[in-house]
Amino acid sequence: MKQHIGALALLVADYDEAIAWYTRTLHFDVIEDTDMGGGKRWVLLAPPGSRETRLLLAQAKGAEQVAQIGHQAGGRVFLFLHTDDFQRDWHRMRAAGVNFREEPREEAYGTVAVFEDLYGNAWDLLQLKRQPSE
C-alpha cells in the first residue's frame, strides 16, 4: 500500500492576498486555482520542486473560522518547509520581509528556524542533516 498526504487546508482571510504572499515571499507555485462558484475557490499551492504535498487555501467563512486564522495549531509550529539550502532560503526570506521568531539553530536533526506566515502561523524552515547512506 502507498499513501501520502495530498494537501493540507490552511485558513486564509483572502485568496488573492494569500496567493500573493506565498508566491512572492516563499516562491510557491500555484498548482490550481479553480472557481467553485459562490465565492469559493479551489486553490492549491506548492513549494518549488514539491511533488506530492500541496497547501489548500481555504478562505474563512463565518466568525468561528475567521477567529482561527493564524491559530490553526494553537500557537505551535504548524507546517515544516524543508529546504536543500537553509542559508539561501533564510537570507532570501528575510530580505523579503518574513518575520523569523528566532535566529537559525543547529539541532541533532538539522538546521532550523521558526518563521511566521502572513497570518502569524508558525512554520519551521528546516534543512535536515544528511544520513550517512545518502
Image: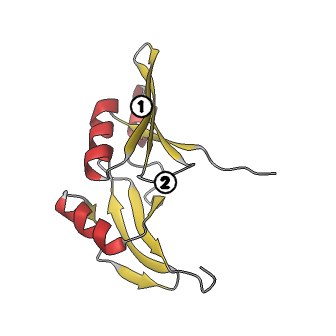
| Displayed quadrant of residue 40 | top left
> Which residue was labeled with disc 2?
73
Residue type highlighted by circle 1: Ala
> Which residue was labeled with disc 1?
60
Residue 131 position (above or below residue 121) = below
| Spot occupied by residue 12 in the image (x, y as percentages of width and height) | 38, 37
| Displayed quadrant of residue 77 | bottom left
Which element carries disc 1, helix, strand or loop? loop
The residue shown at (59%, 82%) is 131
Neighbours of disc 1 within 10 Å: few (<14), some (14-19), many (20+)? some
**Residue projecting furthest to the top:** 38
| Spot occupied by residue 44 in the image (x, y as percentages of width and height) | 46, 37
**Colour mode of the rendering:** secondary structure
Specify whether residue 101 is in view. no
**Residue projecting furthest to the right:** 1
Neighbours of disc 2 within 10 Å: few (<14), some (14-19), many (20+)? few
Q: Are marks 2 and 1 in contact (CB under 8 Å)?
A: no
